[in-house]
Amino acid sequence: MKDSVQRRAWSDIRRGVFTPEPLTDVDEHWVEVTEDSEMMCDLCKGFQQNDSRMGTCTENRTRCLNCASNWTRSAIYGTEVIGMDEFSQDARVAARLLNIYNECVDWRNIEAEKDLRGFLITATLAMLSGYKTANDVLKQVSHRGAIRMPAYMVKGKCRRDLLSQFTVQRETRTQACGGGSYKIRWFYRLLWDGGNVAYHDYMRTVLTKEEIESMFHPTASAEYIGDIFEFWLGMLDLGIQFPTMFGGWGANLDSCLAGLEESFWLFCNSCRPTWRAGGGYKYIARLEHLYNLLTKCCNLPYKWC
């Protein structure tokens, strides 16, 4: 009986600590790369502004942001095969997600900034409630979900030839220079995949037993549960990318996404990976060991912990 009370108490503590909340101080994720930047290789710097090779070169994708973004476009988005750029693909997925949102009354009655956790859970239940195209849309949205790396970390990844570990996205912005001339500015960001095992254990931490039972089959795999967390990330990112389409989600979606990412980082930093008995890693919170010591060795009551 005492052990079950301790486990329940620890679950309540962890859920409270890691529950995602909107952040007021959001990091910048897009970094501008100019001709003088060390984050672009000499080969890409040598191309003219309108040279088509600027969008196809992948020779130095481990340390050049432009080469890495070209690799992302061809290998992940498949722009050359599909014949559609990243923005158009994202817009199509966002439109399909909007159709499901418009059909779900519960989802329309909640805003992300006011109740981020409730918004994410309601959106998930809407996707799993039987809409004809929901499963397909969920997978497409989750495919776009990843953890955004802060801009101040990007230069270090380039210097250490680590860009191949990330998805690199590029955004071009046109700046008028007067006299009918214009300048194209290049911005990049890094997206990191934390892995389905970590996502699975995070979801098992922030959701209650009842919420898990309502969303997941008892035999649901780590990959499936990880896809749900990636759906959360991708959904909020699409909301930021297409604000006019998802105005009903409320303002400051960037703060909501940053809060979800911060919650996951906090979970990872408080855990240590350990090998599962059945194979694969799982994440065990270091704080749980401290909690057990306090309750067992010091005999402290639950309300003090």
Image (cartoon, rainbow, N blue to C red):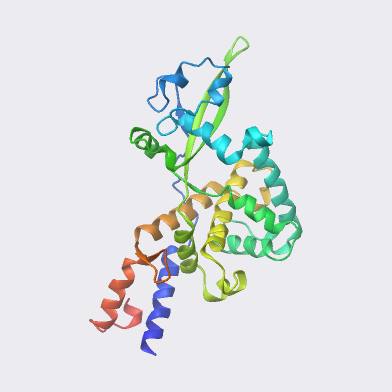
Q: Is residue 274 left or right of residue 97?
A: left
Residue at 52% across, 73% down: 208
Give the answer, above or below, for where 61 lies relative to 137: above
Please provide percent x and percent y for residue 250: 62, 51
Give the answer, above or below, for where 233 lies relative to 105: above
Count the labels in the image: 0
Q: Quadrant of residue 221?
A: bottom right
Please provide percent x and percent y for residue 189: 48, 37
Residue at 51% across, 69% down: 207
Q: In this view, does 211 lie to the left or right of 161?
A: right
User: Is residue 252 visible from the viewing direction of this image?
Assistant: no
Comparing 240 with 84, the one in front is: 84
Residue at 43% across, 63% down: 18
Question: Where does the C terminus fall, quadrant-wise?
Answer: bottom left
Please provide percent x and percent y for residue 297: 23, 82
Please provide percent x and percent y for residue 157: 37, 37
